[in-house]
Image: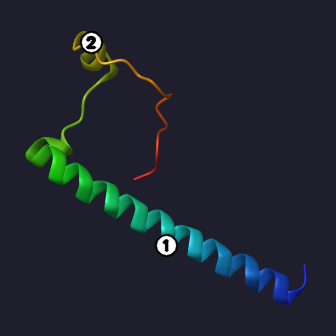
Amino acid sequence: MGAAHLEFVFELRAAVDASRAQHRELLDLLLGGLLGDRANQVFSLDELEAAGIERAVPIRYLPD
């Protein structure tokens, strides 16, 4: 890889990381507005199934 290409890859990666962070912040804001204090609750799959909540899409585990 040339130096210019490598620099472009680093810039692109930084832009993607920044976009992901902004997306995460927006989701946190929206969930906080919709759910209030319940937005930070964590439920197990068993609890969701017991409540009759179906998973329409596969759950994707995101890094912290």
Q: Which residue is mark 1?
A: 18
Q: Residue at x 38, y 59 (%)?
A: 24
* Residue at the outermost left position: 37
How crowded pointer 1 is (Cα within 10 Å; few <14, some 14-19, many 20+) is rated as few
Check the picture and name the quadrant holding the N terminus: bottom right
Q: Is residue 19 left or right of residue 41?
A: right
Q: Which residue is mark 2?
A: 52
How crowded pointer 2 is (Cα within 10 Å; few <14, some 14-19, many 20+) is rated as few
Q: Is residue 51 left or right of residue 49?
A: left
Q: Residue at x 13, y 41 (%)?
A: 38
Which residue type carries mark 1?
A: Ala
Is residue 14 positioned above or below 35 on the image? below
Q: Is residue 28 left or right of residue 54?
A: left
Is residue 12 positioned above or below 3 on the image? above
- Give residue 48's position: percent from left, percent from top: 28, 19
- Give residue 31's position: percent from left, percent from top: 23, 49
